Image (spheres, rainbow, N blue to C red):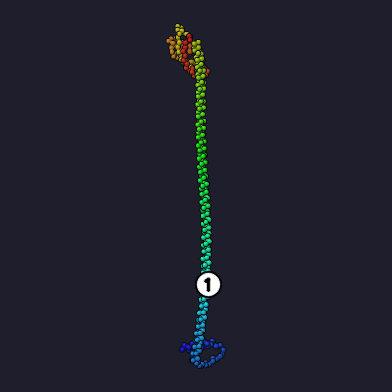
Amino acid sequence: MLAHLALLAVLVFSLDWSPAPSVARKPAPIQAVAIDARKLDAEVERKKKLEETRQLEKKRAEQAELKREQEKKQQVERQRKAELKKKAEAEKKRKVEAQRKKAEADKLLKAEAEKKREAEATRKKAEAEKARKAEEARKVEEARKAEEARKAAEAEKQRKAEEARKKAAAESEMRERLAAEQERLRAQRDSAMQRMIDEYGLYIKERVQRSWIRPAGSNASLSCIVNVRLIPGGEVVDVKIVRSSGNGAFDRSVEAAVFKASPLPVPPDPEVMEKFRSITFEFNPDS
């Protein structure tokens, strides 16, 4: 039955179903075709086998193609894996080489850093030693200068002390000499003043005596001590009997003689004159 249907399908698809041209052509009369069922089955069987063969070959071709594609893919995959492996090995080798170079560079850097550290440590040590020696030298220099300054200060102190001692001695000597000179001058002045006082005292006594008038009946041996106050120029401002003669008339005659003798002679030296502001002397007409 299936064979018949297949044959029928072949016949249907093999017939020309295109529409006929519209020219006046009359359709051919349908002729009945007698089909041998056995031939039809044989043809169907043959075509079936051909189709099966074709399908089998197609399938084999497809499998072969698929196999080729798979082999090609496998080859490509193998090549890709080989390439990847090669690249991985190259990358590994590169990394190993890079690590080696890095290790060598790190080693060199480490050695260089160690050298720098050693050089820096040596430099710092040398600088520290230099600084220590400089500090020691500075301290020694400072100590030397301090000692020199101390000695200089001590010498200056001693010099000043010696100068002060000499100056004090000189000043003391000068003061002594000045005091001695002043004393000499004072003694000389006092002596001169005393001579002048004595001299003018005699002048005053003589002036008073020349002005004195002996009272009648007075004893020749009478005397008194009289105090006379003078002003510059010798004018008498006051007369007092300090020690009476015992004879009132005699005493009054002496007072009258003093006033009469005014102004009394006085020294021109103001300092000596100060001694004559108030003078006391003994009046003895017969001395």
| Tag 1 residue | 79
Near-viewer residue (120 or 224)? 120
Near-viewer residue (115 or 173)? 115
SS at mark 1 in the image: helix
* Residue 242 point in image, percent of width and height: 44, 14
Residue drawn where x is 42% and y is 10% of the image: 246
Q: Given the current orientation, which residue lies at the most extreme top position?
A: 217
Question: Which amino acid type is marked by label 1?
Answer: Gln
Q: Is residue 261 visible?
A: no
* Residue 157 point in image, percent of width and height: 50, 33
Q: Is residue 267 above or below residue 91?
A: above
Q: Given the current orientation, which residue lies at the most extreme right position?
A: 23
Near-viewer residue (202 or 20)? 202
Q: Is residue 112 visible?
A: yes
Residue drawn where x is 51% and y is 49% of the image: 125
Q: Is residue 102 above or below residue 259?
A: below
Crowding at dot 1, Cα within 10 Å, few <14 / some 14-19 / many 20+, comes out as few
